[in-house]
Image (cartoon, rainbow, N blue to C red):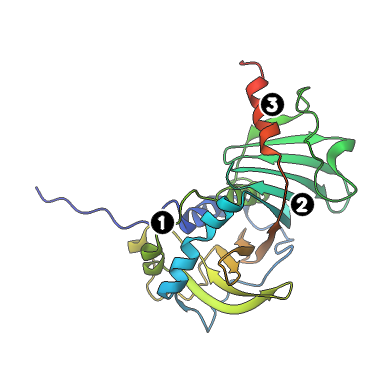
Amino acid sequence: MTRTAPAPRVAAGAAAVALALTLGLGACGSDGADGAGSGGSASPTASARPLTTDEAQGLATMRFQNYAAGVRTVRFEVADGGRSYAVDGWVDFAAHLGYAVARETSSGEAGLLAWTSQTVSTFDGAAASDDGGKPPLPPPGLDDAAWTTSELLPERSRLHALLSVLVRLGNDRPDNPVLLQQSDARWLRADSVDGVPVQVLAGPTSDDVSAQDPDADGSAATVRYWVDESWRILRLEARLGGSGDWTAVDLGTAEGVDFADAFHAAAQAAPTP
């Protein structure tokens, strides 16, 4: 009996990030405030072209570089459920754990978020911010059940969709550069982030190379990566909702920041239900 070989997949790499967003696009819908921190529209890019071998190899290392760095800063604004939130914190890409302050921009009300790929925990109160900046260290309230935990639902919330994407931006090994070069990932243009020269790349639209358009111009992508000369990501753009606008997440260095150990210790000490 003849068996059909499975289609090549970019799975567990840059396409996994696109897939996480795709799951959330339909239900999130248009929110009337798309593009907080927007980086542009989804229109075709005249300069778009397939990745070179060097570019595919560089993009393949992007998530591994985050994993090796451990903790990095993240900052973004997103419209969700008729409100706009400013989120400022860190992601530990080795632990796949995020921790941030989320502020409702119109009221200024703030709370703490901690999230994994499956759950999100919230903490409300005066300790939710540290002089208007990053969340406090060590995280407060871990020993008195002050945090409320629920399922992360990227298909229902733009905020959750971005949180889900961010914890997927770290991996303990490089991705497959051959499949990335065969995919519909595209080099879009040269640009800059805070004066640092970057290349802007459109990520693959799915994990199935055979289902992708070989003549793609990058306009169907749901993620764009802004990477410096060492292929470190400085900005992620995610296309949310039906209007085609982009939400930008800026990433930076975070020397000496450690919050994962505190959360893990609290989880181990928690009574078993």
Amino acid type assigned to the residue bearing label 2 in the image: Asp
- Percent of width and height locating residue 24: 57, 51
Q: Which mark is residue 88?
A: 2
- Tag 3 secondary structure: helix
Given residues 46 and 96, the one toward you in this image is: 96
Q: Residue at x 46, y 62 (%)?
A: 60
Using the numbered discs, state the Cα–Cα distance from disc 3 to disc 1 in whole angstroms: 36 Å
253 relative to 228 in the view: left or right:
right
Mark with earlier residue (3, 1):
1
Disc nearer the start of the sequence (2/3): 2
Pointer 3: what residue?
266
Residue 178 occupies quadrant: bottom left
Q: Which residue is mark 1?
A: 207
Please give the name of the residue rendered at 58% of the width and 66% of the height, measured from the top-left corner. 225
42 vs 78: above or below: below
Q: Please, what is the three-letter code of the amino acid marked with disc 1?
A: Asp
Q: Which-is-in-front pick, marks 2 and 1?
A: 2
Q: Position of residue 7 (x, y in %)?
A: 29, 56
Is residue 82 visible in the rendered structure shown here? Answer: no
Regarding mark 1 in the picture, which secondary structure is present there? loop
